[in-house]
Image: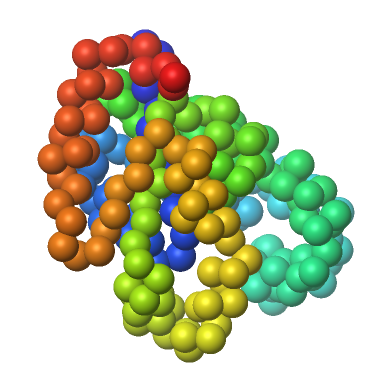
Amino acid sequence: MKKTVIGITGGIGSGKSAILEAFAALGVPAYDCDGRTKDLYREDKALASEVVQLLGTEVLGADGSLNTRKMAARLFGDRTLLEKLESVVHPAVAADFLRWAATQPSDIVILESAILLEKPFFDKFADYVITVSAPEEVRVKRATKRDGATREQILRRMANQWTDAQREAKADMTIITDDTTAYLPRILELIENLKQNKNGNRS
């Protein structure tokens, strides 16, 4: 059975986790791209080897596994090197997602990625895309509390991501998580509509 894939994206502190929890409560499973990428660095020896060949042994930790902090430092400011890494990592993540999706009992699954719309490689897997958004101050408050970072650090990270307007221009739906707007009815309506339209094709 072909799965209908809902892509969920959004910037730091946007509230994606709350939306994923709502979908999970309704029986819709989610694939976390960031989390699974880190898992694949440990589990997929061939992938890890390719990454080391590209970035060098300095990105390895004391235990011989890939260290994501060292990888980030190695990639800092080098967009060409980042693109080369993505050309290796993204296909591995995509293959893992497809394997995972095939094992799910639900005919609707979620592909969650902060860069879903920024990277066409992942966008092509989604039949329907939701971008999650929140006012800037709400996002900063959430992120500083969650990450233990300063306001300035969070603002710098936000500046390196797409804006809400950029995501909204390419998404099929925007969900606001400002702690006052009710989003569950919209999620319920979307699931019902997708179930009625098994193809789930984006317009």
Residue at horizontal 40 percent and vertical 29 percent from the top: 128
Depth order, front residue of 121/174: 174
Q: Position of residue 131 (x, y in %)?
A: 40, 46
Q: Is residue 187 toward the left or the right of residue 155 in the image?
A: left
Q: How is the image coloured?
A: rainbow
Depth order, front residue of 148/66: 148
Residue 109 vertical position relative to residue 180 in the rendered view, above or below: above
Residue at horizontal 16 percent and vertical 62 percent from the top: 180
Q: How many marks?
A: 0
Q: Is residue 160 toward the left or the right of residue 15 in the image?
A: right
Q: Is residue 123 toward the left or the right of residue 53 in the image?
A: left
Quadrant in which the N terminus is drawn:
top left
Q: Position of residue 48 (x, y in %)?
A: 72, 52
Quadrant in which the C terminus is drawn:
top left
Depth order, front residue of 141/93: 141
Can residue 34 be seen in the rendering of this structure? no
Residue 199 vertical position relative to residue 40 in the rendered view, above or below: above
Q: Position of residue 46 (x, y in %)?
A: 73, 43
Residue at horizontal 27 percent and vertical 21 percent from the top: 194
Residue at horizontal 25 percent and vertical 64 percent from the top: 178
Residue 12 vertical position relative to residue 201 in the rendered view, above or below: below
Depth order, front residue of 36/148: 148
Q: Position of residue 192 (x, y in %)?
A: 18, 24
Can residue 176 be seen in the rendering of this structure? yes
